[in-house]
Amino acid sequence: MNSVSEIQEAVQGAKSVRVRGGGSKPALSQRDCQVDAQCLDLSALKGVIDYQPEEYTFTARAGTPVAEMTALLAEKGQYLPFDPPLAERGATLGGTVAAGLSGPGRYRYGGIRDFLIGIRFVDGKGQEVRGGGAVVKNAAGFDFPKLFVGSLGRLGILTELTFKVFPQPSAYATVAAEFDGLSDLLGALDAVTRSAIDLHAVDFAPEEQGWTLWVRIGGLLTVLQERAQALRTVVSAGTGQMRSLSLYQDQEEEEGLWQTVRSMRWLTEGTGLVRIPLTPQRIPAVEEALSGSQTATRRYSVGGNLLWLGWPDVTAQAGVEQDSSRDLHGLLQELGLQGIQLIGRARREGANRDEGDARDHEGPLLGRPLQNAFLRRIAAALDPEGKFEPW
Amino acid sequence: MNVHPLIETLSRLYDADRLLTRPAQLMAYESDALTAFQQRAAAVVIPQNREEVIETIRLCHGYNVPFVARGSGTSLSGGSLPIADGIVIALNRLDRILRLDAAERIAVVEPGVINLKVSEAAKPYGLYYAPDPSSQSICTIGGNVAFNSGGAHCLKYGMTSNHVLGMTVALPDGEVVELGGESLEGIGPDLPGFFVGSEGLFGVALEITLRLLPIPQTYRTVLAAYDSLHAAGDAVTAVVASGLLPGAIEIMDALAIKAAEVGAKAGYPTAPALLIVELEGEESAVEAEFSQLMQLIEETAPVEVRMAQTADERARIWKGRKAAFSAVGRLAPDYIVQDGVVPRSRLGDALAEIDRLSASYGIDVANVFHAGDGNLHPLILFDGREEGALERAEELAGEVLELCVELGGSITGEHGVGMEKRAFLPKMYGPLEMQAMEDVRRSVDSKSLANRGKMLPAGEAESLTHVGPHPLEKAGVIFRE
Ligand SMILES: Cc1cc2nc3c(=O)[nH]c(=O)nc-3n(C[C@H](O)[C@H](O)[C@H](O)COP(=O)(O)OP(=O)(O)OC[C@H]3O[C@@H](n4cnc5c(N)ncnc54)[C@H](O)[C@@H]3O)c2cc1C
Ligand SMILES: Cc1cc2nc3c(=O)[nH]c(=O)nc-3n(C[C@H](O)[C@H](O)[C@H](O)COP(=O)(O)OP(=O)(O)OC[C@H]3O[C@@H](n4cnc5c(N)ncnc54)[C@H](O)[C@@H]3O)c2cc1C
């Protein structure tokens, strides 16, 4: 697809349409391209339309690679504070919006939903419709930009996106603390997230032994050292047993820590990637459910509001260890959680499926079904003939 | 419409003191804070719990009678104006904070909870609810949700929409749905985000999960006076370009300053323009940023600079600013306020054009606004007793809105379209966009019952009478920005 009018014609002409940005989340974008639907590759629909650094906003075509955009912003000392993930794997702006993905920096100023201020999309009738606007504050009309965050290409095809951006902090520091157990870590997490320290990112993960918590702060270099000391004090003041604590201030090394997170480089080769929203209070139950599963590599992000879970991929080549006893879909259902498969496919037990959920046997949505009368009604309006994948 | 049989049925659900039908009772609900519009409802119901709200909506749907949810009625755009022969659902008694979870930093509230009460309840835990409309001591979270309300401190952390995680909503036919949840992250389309700002057209929010933030350790506030509005505008550009991220950047013009003096004895310097910039956050960071800010401000050649060193001094700076709006009302019997948005770099152009319009109409316009995000608040002063004065003021207001659209902005930053700006939404969006909104609305609300006639253009004209401050504003209880 090289132009909006091509997309419009394709939507008007086809019975069924699926969208693919760059395919960095193949579990979302690729499975349907094999069936009879017409699959539109948007990766050619790219380029910045308007970037005004003094306005702290930009407009770009949906297929623009995130990496290109962040490089352009960096030249002006600006950034997308929600840390869009998978950039070096070719993620596009449109795919990131449609998948609703924010990285660790989401903790500080909000997620992708909070920075997307305007969109253009091709609806199910093949019309290009505008939503939101180009200014940072706008309360006029329905907020279509928010609706399209997480819409998975099922409500329309994004063609153009307008974001607000922020000035990039001049320097960062990260405190990493190791704990013997999860409850020790959760004690420190509570102390640090309730403190008045302005935190850019709060992530944690189980290690070979124990758990590690990473807390990131940013701002003027001149006072960063002093603030990092204050942060250390808060982290250590938690109730739990802390094994060690290190401070990363070398800018390259520090950035490297978070680069690994944004690119999901911690993910073991051959495992799929599942994204699971939750709250810190749910984590002990999740950990108990996962216990005994050696194959579940994982990382908690956004102060314990998000779990990135590496899970055996049934579509992976032989040689990858499979944990055949585990049905992630059922497990999430039991926990009352929802997940979305971004890469690979988790094995599913047919027996655990809800009736209403049967259609989505191989779909990316796992756990508690996403059924919602409000969403159904909206989708019926934007896509009356059901050209896009149903919810 | 079968409003009488509906009222008959409602009378079995509500005691007489919670089902208002007598004209004297209905009068109190005839307008919101945009008193230019008045309309009498067929009945006002005052539910005490969510079941009563849901049942009322179901009945309205069954009898095909339109309804309007109402919080405190402080809408400035006619959003909570009743619909002729419709029902008003007054939500003020659903005012419980159901849960305040400090560990998860959330509050789950009923829609009638007053905005400020949330921060008050969170304070013992070192937390607060960030959006701070100047009406926060009286407006409800339900109203804030419907209008995506903002305030002076929304520059850094955003409007209502950025702070709502989840909701339980009764759709316009009474079907109850859960949107979002308690996590900062979600799966699927951002439905709470789509509901916020929908001006009551998607139904009634029954329960809202709000995100709380840790109270900033400290604030540093500076007030700078300039010899022209343009110079103050340039200072904003310099501050924004510096990469500092203030919590608030506000500007007042000469007329607004004068009003603040008369109304609140703010003790401001007499100057053509005042700029207020506030930094918030950790002590050491704010200290360092503040010296950077002061250096910047010095370079913009202000005629006078005052720094707030104490909480008292900070409060004094804000008192004048927050009171300015209402105080302007004392300079003339009536006024209209607009809240259009322009790109930040076009603020100077917009203000110059407003000045020109003011001169050519011979109507005073005072400006008090959120300069940091380009959100104008021109106050158009007039005397409603003069023949044709309201019409000319409205004409000027319309030109300001068109100006905002021309400059690539929006007709409203936080007050909503409501009844007042319906005619202007199609100037901002084309026919396809208007159709898409109408289609979604029809699909969500097949009978167009929920807040019929608001936001989206619709037939019936409303009776115009008098324009002026909200009664509570006249009494000095609340102020507007
Ligand atoms: C593990 C892995 C390693 C990789 N390594 C490399 C590499 O080394 N080099 C390389 O070049 N590539 C690599 N790739 C492939 C690369 O990731 C793809 O090019 C990917 O581009 C970008 O996809 P996306 O983020 O745009 O979203 P997609 O995965 O394309 O789409 C995500 C979701 O968004 C929807 N969507 C996308 N665009 C729109 C739109 N405009 N409107 C509405 N909905 C939309 C889709 O329907 C889908 O539901 C790798 C991929 C993976 C998984
Ligand atoms: C003096 C003054 C100062 C103001 N300052 C500001 C300001 O700084 N920033 C700002 O943004 N606004 C400001 N406003 C406007 C107003 O206070 C806000 O719009 C506020 O959110 C309205 O709340 P309310 O409870 O009064 O709602 P109402 O006026 O009662 O209702 C507003 C809209 O919300 C709908 N509604 C109410 N409850 C619900 C619900 N539970 N579910 C769905 N829809 C519902 C109504 O139908 C109506 O359309 C000011 C107003 C005044 C009078």
Image (cartoon, coloured by chain):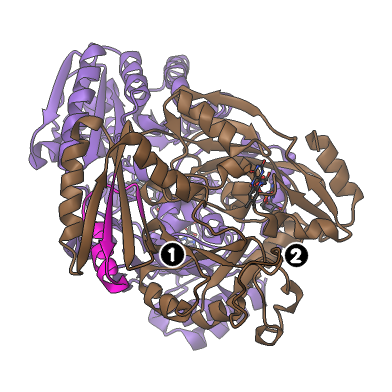
Chain colours: A brown, B purple
* Residue A390, label in figure: 2
| Image coordinates for residue A58, horizontal then vertical, percent | 55, 30
- Judged left or right of residue B384, residue A22 is right
Residue B214 visible here: yes
* Left/right of residue A291 with respect to residue B312 in the rendered view: right
Instruction: Give yes or no for residue A194 being in the magenta stretch.
Output: yes
Q: Left or right of A47: which side holds A183?
A: left
Instruction: Measure the alpha-carbon separation of dots 2 and 1.
Output: 25 Å
User: Disc 2 sits on a residue from what chain?
Assistant: A
- Residue B247, image x, y percentages: 29, 38
Name which residue type carries label 1. Answer: Ser
Residue A8 falls in image quadrant: top right
Residue type for callout 2: Pro
Tag 1 residue:
B183
Query: A256 and A113: which one is in front?
Result: A256
Looking at the image, is B471 positioned above or below residue A306?
above
Task: Evaluate whether residue B93 shows in this view.
Answer: no
Q: Residues within 10 Å of mark 1 (few under 14, many from 20)?
A: many
Q: Residue at x 39, y 40 (%)?
A: A255
Residue A63 vertical placement versus A214 (above, below) = above
Per the image, label 1 sits on a secondary structure element best described as loop
Q: Which residues are magenta?
A: A174-202
Along the line of sight, the residue nearer the viewer: B135 or A38? A38
When asked about the image quadrant of residue A344, the answer is bottom right
Residue drawn at the location 36% of the way across and 59% of the way down = A303
